[in-house]
Image (tube, rainbow, N blue to C red):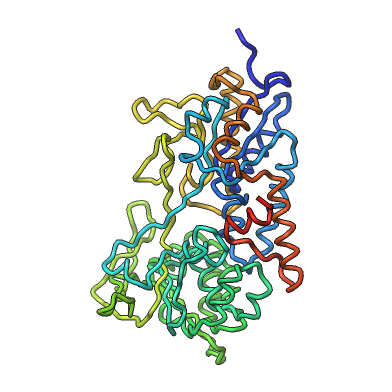
Amino acid sequence: MTARPGTVDRPLRVAIVGAGPAGYYAADHLLRQEGLVIEVDMFDRLPTPYGLVRLGVAPDHQKIKSVTGIFDKVAANPRFRFYGGVEFGRDLTVDDLRRHYHQILYSTGAQTDRRMGIPGEDLRGSHPATEFVAWYNGHPDYRDYQFDLSHERAAIVGVGNVAVDVARILCRTPEELAKTDIADHALEALRQSRLQEVYLLGRRGPAQAAFTNPEIKELSELPGADLIVLPEEAELDALSRAALERSQDRATMKKVEILQEAARRAPTGKPRRLTLRFLVSPVEVMGDEAGQVVGLRLVRNQLYATETGALQAKPTNEFEELQVGLVFRSVGYQGVPLSGVPFNESWGVILNEKGRVLDPATRQPRVGEYTAGWIKRGPTGVIGTNKPDAAETVACMIEDAAQGRVREPAEPDAGAAQRLVRERQPHYVSYADWQKLDALEVARGRAGGRPRVKFTRVKEMMAALER
């Protein structure tokens, strides 16, 4: 009987698909295991690592991006390798990974938006918020998207952190944006923006809004936009008031206080208005004959208590119309199935239990296959939430390895895996290559007093690496 993997002569070989926070936190936990020699190979479809930290976190929130320092320490481990620009399902299949690794971990995030499911959603000028976020953050896939900022009014459906990011970016002055790492093409387009009013639309009341207190405070202090909250919508309904009195939740109390204070403040005449609405839901995106968005039809909601006591919104018979030329929907993310990996369509996640991937027929774990992050649990929490999530999965991986429940790959050595990658994707980007690109971006930013100027096309990245 061969010795269990995890020794110097026979390392436990792990493939991680997806180079976002969940993948890095999992790699960190794996490489810290005492008494086990583990080698981690990380694959990402894009040439650049960090996932949503690079391509989702708003450019005016640089502090959040400092988590990449932790990821770089993980990548500095000699038993870690990064293969950027290698797409799972195209360049490598599940069977390829099974041939070279004892364990495979999928951490590909949630890559699409939920739809609102209302008429007019696909009119010109109606977009998923995540596409706009990817565009202004310089994601190569969205580099050439167009957003018509010549309209005077825009609406964002949703009040979660992505919706708030979009609102802030639309309301920031060009001078503020020019100090960030926003993509150059987006900076130029936002300089020309003619937007005067941005609406943020929440389907429930102020006490149920998903944004945090620091986020709403930041919106109330924007140099270029007055925050407008309607006094009648800032007032709590009886159910919300009773729920808050019962829970004594200090953060929610503070949130309501901030919003009610904003409702009492008169506008100061800043160039833009950011109007925050509550208890409204869109029932139709209205368009003209040319198929262009011209407005949103909204229904007024009221709250009711479910059996569990949660407060949900239900529509009334009151409607109103909002004249807007641009609509962004931000009503949640959706996971995308991976070729050959069991998927729960209704939840939008990989079929799993505590991170162990399950066989759909038997509901038993598939040996050696795991998942972490949003593709495991759904799009919840912040970047740091992925740390305990990854730790839970890694605990299962270590437990399975200790009991010999690992795959028996035909060619488990690092050289064989590297040869396969070279054959399938000769232009893959190593971590050393990424560090060169990183240094070049930072140098390009230094001249303009910016954190970096991003490469936004894969071709540009390859040219910079002299490929």
Q: Residue at x 59, y 65 (%)?
A: 58
Q: Quadrant of residue 439?
A: bottom right
Q: Position of residue 246 (x, y in %)?
A: 47, 60
Please indicate, yes or no, whether residue 150 appears anywhere in the rendered image: yes
Please indicate, yes or no, whether residue 161 appears anywhere in the rendered image: no
> Residue furthest toward the left?
317
User: Does 346 appear above or below 99?
Assistant: below
Residue sitting nearer the eye, 146 or 315:
146
> Residue furthest toward the front?
467
Q: Position of residue 115 (x, y in %)?
A: 35, 59
Q: Position of residue 467 (x, y in %)?
A: 65, 50
**Left or right side of 386 for 126:** left
**Left or right side of 22 for 198:** left
> Residue furthest toward the top?
1
Q: Position of residue 405 (x, y in %)?
A: 54, 20
User: Does 449 appear above or below 73?
Assistant: below
**Left or right side of 181 for 274:** left
Q: Quadrant of residue 123?
A: bottom left
In the picture, the quarter occupied by the N terminus is: top right
Q: Residue at x 34, y 70 (%)?
A: 281
Residue sitting nearer the eye, 289 or 324:
289
Q: Residue at x 54, y 35 (%)?
A: 105
User: Does 33 appear above or below 454?
Assistant: above
Residue sitting nearer the eye, 154 or 314:
154
Q: Quadrant of residue 283?
A: bottom left
Across the whole image, how many numbered discs are drawn on residues?
0
